[in-house]
Amino acid sequence: MQESPSLDPKPVSFSQTTLTELMIPSYANFGGKIHGGILLSLIDKVAYACASRHAATYCVTVSVDGVDFLKPVEVGDLVSLMASVNYVGKTSLVIGIRVIAENVRNGVQRHTNTSYVTMVAKGEDDRPALVPPLLLESEADGRRFLEAMKRRELREQYRHAFDSEKGRIEVGENLDELSQQRCVIGW
């Protein structure tokens, strides 16, 4: 495992990043709203900028948690994605991102998304690199760090529970359950 250039603790404020972009017509989907994929791309971009600033090295996306599209984003909105490091492990970072869309004509701002992106720092040899500890500057920083730890723990519990169930799910034993869902059994 490679070390990043400096392993001195860095405060949350050091790597906070805001990306603001105008939503143009070519970003719209068939319904006239901004396509979710555009927003996901911007989320990934701001997560990278924030993580690589903290780690002082190249970072790659490992997972994206909790992308809930709370409100639509319109063509002409200014979208600001505010990112900060919420958690660091040995080589990983969890970046919290809040997405705000602003109608520039009336100044109304809407919280449209919150997302959590896990990134891993990479060294010159393309192997995971140690990242600096996170200096928590406020109770809010501490709360976000603890929340990220809990999300990680719950995700692992879910993954373990689902993996142990996955191999035991038998279609024949669950035909009654399937027949009560919005599906048609065609075999």
Image (cartoon, helix red, strand yellow):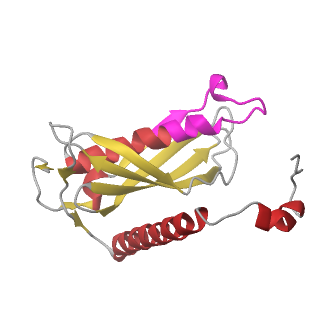
Horizontal side of 54 relative to 153 (left or right) equals left
Give the x, y percent position of residue 98: 50, 54
Please tell me whether residue 68 belongs to the stretch shown in magenta: no
Q: Nearer the viewer, residue 5 or 99?
A: 5
Horizontal side of 160 relative to 176 (left or right) equals left
Give the x, y percent position of residue 141: 35, 69
Who's the residue at 42% across and 67% down the image?
152
Q: Nearer the viewer, residue 94 or 179?
A: 179
Q: Nearer the viewer, residue 126 or 145?
A: 126
The range drawn in magenta is 19-41
Give the vertical position of 90 relative to 76 (above or below). Answer: below
Who's the residue at 41% across and 51% down the image?
83
Horizontal side of 93 relative to 156 (left or right) equals left
Give the vertical position of 61 relative to 86 (above or below). Answer: above
| Residue 2 visible in the picture | yes
Give the x, y percent position of residue 121: 25, 47
Count how many numbered circles sit on residues in the image. Answer: 0
Give the vertical position of 31 relative to 68 (above or below). Answer: above
Horizontal side of 26 relative to 20 (left or right) equals right
Who's the residue at 32% across and 56% down the image?
93
| Residue 104 visible in the picture | no
